Image (spheres, rainbow, N blue to C red):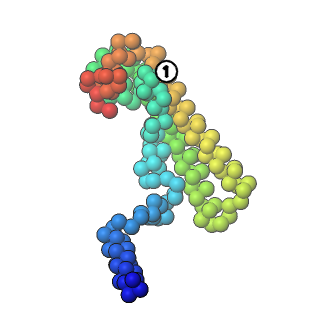
Amino acid sequence: MESRRPQIRRAAVCGAALFALAGCAPQQPYAGLESRAIKALSAKETDGYLSGEGMGFALAAELNGYPGPKHVLEHAETLALSGAQLAETRRLFDEMRAESVALGKALVQKESELDALFAEERIDESSLRAVVGAIAELQGRLRAAHLKHHLKMKTLLSPQQLAKYEGLRGYRGGHNGHH
C-alpha cells in the first residue's frame, strides 16, 4: 500500500488539473465585474435607469390587473382606445417617463458616488449610511413613480378593455399573450 500512495497522489493532482482545464473549476461570480463603470450596476441597468424603463418596478401592479401606460399604448388599437383615452394614456406615459428619467439619473449619480467613495478609499460609516440611504430613497421614489401611473391607468380603461389587456399580455389564461 505504501508504494501506491505516490501514484494515488499523482492521479489526484492530474484529475484536479484536468478538471480545471476542462472549465469545470468553480466559477467566481464577480470575476470581470470590476471593469464596470459603476460596480453595482450593469450597463443594461444603467441604461434602464437613464431611459426611464420600468425594469420590473411595477410588477405588483401589472400582474394584479393594473396596466402600465407603455403597454396600453403598444396595444392601443386592439384595445380600441377612444381619442380621449389615447391622449390621456400618452400624457400619463410622458409624465411617468419624465419622472422616471429624472429619478433614474439621480440614482445612477448616487451609485457612482458610492462607487467612487470606495474606489478612492474615502468611505466611512457616516458617508456610507448617507449615500446608501439616498440610493434607497431614490429607488423607492422611482418604484412609486411607475406604480402610481399603473394606478391611474386602471381608472382610465373599461372592465372590458382591462380584460382584453390581460389577454393580450398573456395573464390569467389569456390566449394572445406576448409577455
Q: Give the amino acid type for the residue marked by disc 1 in the picture.
A: Lys
Using the image, determine if residue 70 lies above or below residue 117. above
Using the image, determine if residue 122 lies above or below residue 43. below
Q: Position of residue 12 (x, y in %)?
A: 38, 76
Q: Residue at x 38, y 87 (%)?
A: 3
Residue sitting at the far bottom = 3
Q: Residue at x 45, y 19 (%)?
A: 154
Using the image, determine if residue 106 lies above or below residue 26. above
Quarter containing the C terminus: top left
Label 1, secondary structure: give it.
Answer: helix
Taking the image as drawn, is residue 96 in sight? no
Q: Position of residue 83 (x, y in %)?
A: 35, 16
Q: Quadrant of residue 168?
A: top left
Residue position for label 1: 152
Is residue 107 left or right of 3 when viewed as pictured? right
Q: Residue at x 58, y 36 (%)?
A: 141
Is residue 23 left or right of 110 when viewed as pictured? left
Quarter containing the N terminus: bottom left
Is residue 106 left or right of 93 when viewed as pictured? right
Residue sitting at the far left = 176
